[in-house]
Image (cartoon, rainbow, N blue to C red):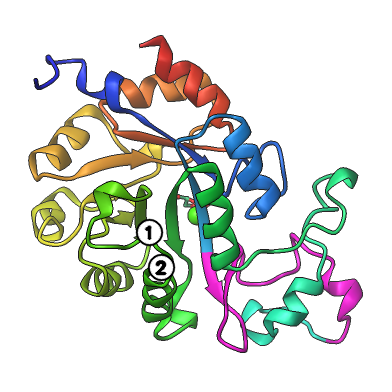
Amino acid sequence: APAAPGERAASRVLDVAHRGGSAYAPENTLAAIDAAHEHDATAVEIDVQRSKDGELVVVHDTTLARTTDVEEVFPDRSPYNVADFTLAEIQRLDAGSWFGAEFDGEPLPTLEQALDRLGEHRTGLFLEIKSPELYPGIEDDIAETLKAKPGWASENASGGQRLVIQSFDRASAERSQELLPSVPHGILGRVDEAQIETYAAWADMINPNHTGIDAAYVDRVHEAGMDVVAYTVNEPDDMRAAIGKGVDGIISDYPDVAREVIQEE
Ligand code: G3P
Ligand code: CA
């Protein structure tokens, strides 16, 4: 039976771990995926880019400088763009020490490695196509990788893993939706009210910053037949506020805190 008014959000709010459980482990690593699982996240949000030799790599920034030791290992390769390094070079880097000594040597995973780990945990995935303007055709590479893994992008998606693909780049998200029509797709960032209906033609979600929306906006997206998953919500009061506005999910560095707040309802 349909939920009574006011129950919709409380019973169905998704708990999505931002860049993995990134408050507890170095972002966008297998350790972060493990931390998300240990903290009971429903799904993990990760960022996907592409190496020089065409491999899909999980990393947020378009350069390797902030989250790895690339400046020590390859001092003459400034500005350290992800796109200028082969996968073998990228996976030599330490993407864990900056976060804590116990993560020394943790590498940046490939998308395939991340999918395997998520599959082991039976955790869902919010896959962000990050900066696709730097990686022409990356949507095709992502679709190919997902199709090669049973349960992720199959036509019978209901029996497989929960998967959402999203991007700030609307053309990229739409291109991906054309390649993977059975996979829900989301637009990151707030879409102007006047354009919401237009995007409902192919998008399943609008996923804005939690600070930029109110209950009327969330209602409007729902009326157009799409969900709203808000990022990046780290304070319990902000989580309560987002749930009060009617969001369908929360993307947080603290999936355990989000879980507790969701269960308060
Ligand atoms: O999933 C939404 C959120 O990850 C977008 O911001 O910069 O963390 O990729 P960013
Ligand atoms: Ca992201």
Classify residue 183 as left or right of residue 129. left
Q: Nearer the viewer, residue 40 or 238?
A: 40
Which residue is situated farthest in the top direction here? 264
Whether residue 79 is visible: no
Q: Tell me the residue at 39%/77% (across/down).
A: 144
Q: Nearer the viewer, residue 226 or 179?
A: 179
User: In the image, residue 246 lies at what x, y percent?
Assistant: 25, 26
Inspect the image, locate mark 1, and give the three-letter code of the amino acid beneath it: Trp
**Picture quadrant where residue 201 is located:** bottom left
Of pointers 1 and 2, the one earlier in the residue sequence? 2
Q: Disc 2 designates what residue?
A: 146
Q: Marks 1 and 2: CB-CB under 8 Å?
A: yes
What is the span of residues highlighted in magenta in the rendered image?
48-76
Q: Tell me the residue at 30%/67% (across/down).
A: 173
Q: Secondary structure at mark 2?
A: helix
User: In the image, residue 102 lies at what x, y percent?
Assistant: 87, 44
Q: Is mark 2 within 8 Å of ligand 2?
A: no
Q: Nearer the viewer, residue 48 or 224?
A: 48
Q: Tell me the residue at 83%/52% (across/down).
A: 98
User: In the image, residue 23 lies at what x, y percent?
Assistant: 67, 37
Q: Secondary structure at mark 1?
A: loop
Q: Disc 1 designates what residue?
A: 152
Classify residue 197 as left or right of residue 43. left
| Quarter of the image with the N terminus in it | top left
